[in-house]
Image: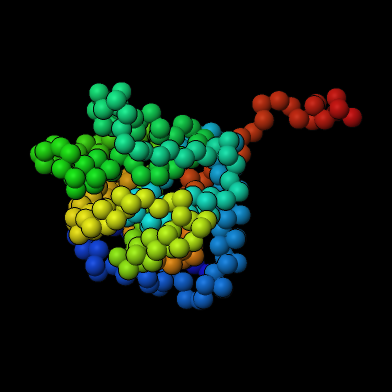
Amino acid sequence: MAEIDWKRYLVQPGQKVKLADWDAGSTPAWKGSKEAAEKPLLELNDELEALQELLFAQARHKVLIVLQGMDTSGKDGVIRRVFEGVNPQGVRVASFKVPTAPEMARDYLWRVHQQVPARGEMVIFNRSHYEDVLVVRVHNLVPPEQWQRRYEQINAFERLLAEEGTTILKFFLHIDMEEQRERLLARLDEPDKRWKFNPGDLKERALWAEYEKAYEDVLEKTSTKHAPWIIIPANRKWYRDLVISAVMVDALKDLKMEYPQPAENLDACRAELA
């Protein structure tokens, strides 16, 4: 299978990010066609299934996947396609909506910490703690001095998770404004997608420039060695899935996992069953 050069999308610690310089429709990590990518994508999915089963069986490592992006960027699609076939016993999706009253009564990371993965578990954050430096900022829900100090708090929180054995993979699904327009129109025009449409999406779209600046600051200020951001060109769904799958497989391989050895004498058990 051809190598997928996903490391070109890593945001290095301290790197300046201007999203206009990142082509959301480009596919440089794959030299072939969309059709030619189907085979390696299936192979990567098979590998991911096997590695996730190993993660669950060994019950030593923890994996946190953070999915962020503009409305319609494909977070749900990634969960459906990249993680298709993985063992649901060891994979969980956590979505962060508008905070409830009990959540609002506590610090903004309280509800997030409750959802982080346990040993042997893979947890996917569909949106995340980053909403507290994105939506909160764009809609002026708290004073600037409050959300500005959250970058450092988030870095410290993620460093704690990493030092306690969590592998953190953060994906920014990067689409451009024209692609979002087409996806919103599809939600209006196609009966099986219409349920996804929310008139509020148009109000958020009007704030595109503000969100873009907020995301640039997130990518610059919270991409660290222990929890790097990866900017995924997401206009083409097949390419998005291919690159994320390659990242996932490489990250799990790097854990060098092995199946645990049985505690019992299997020869004696076999003899008893004979």
Q: Give the x, y percent position of residue 192.
A: 52, 56
Relative placement, left or right, of 176 versus 195 is left
In this view, the residue in front, 164 or 82, is 82
Q: Give the x, y percent position of residue 230.
A: 34, 56
Q: Looking at the picture, does residue 105 appear above or below residue 219?
A: above
Q: Give the x, y percent position of residue 265.
A: 74, 27
Relative placement, left or right, of 271 versus 46 is right
In this view, the residue in front, 270 or 169, is 169
On the question of residue 23 being in view, the answer is: yes
In this view, the residue in front, 130 or 152, is 130
Which residue is situated farthest in the right direction here? 274
Q: Residue at x 21, y 42 (%)?
A: 136
Q: State the image quarter where residue 140 is shown.
A: top left
Q: Residue at x 64, y 33 (%)?
A: 261
Q: Looking at the picture, does residue 22 appear above or below residue 152?
A: below
Q: State the image quarter where residue 260 is shown.
A: top right
Q: Residue at x 60, y 60 (%)?
A: 43
Quarter of the image that includes the N terminus: bottom right
Which residue is situated farthest in the bottom direction here? 32
Q: Give the x, y percent position of residue 155.
A: 25, 41
Quarter of the image that includes the C terminus: top right
Q: State the image quarter where residue 52 is shown.
A: top right
Count of numbered circles in the view: 0
Colouring scheme, one of rainbow, by chain, secondary structure, one colour: rainbow
On the question of residue 245 being in view, the answer is: no
In this view, the residue in front, 191 or 104, is 191
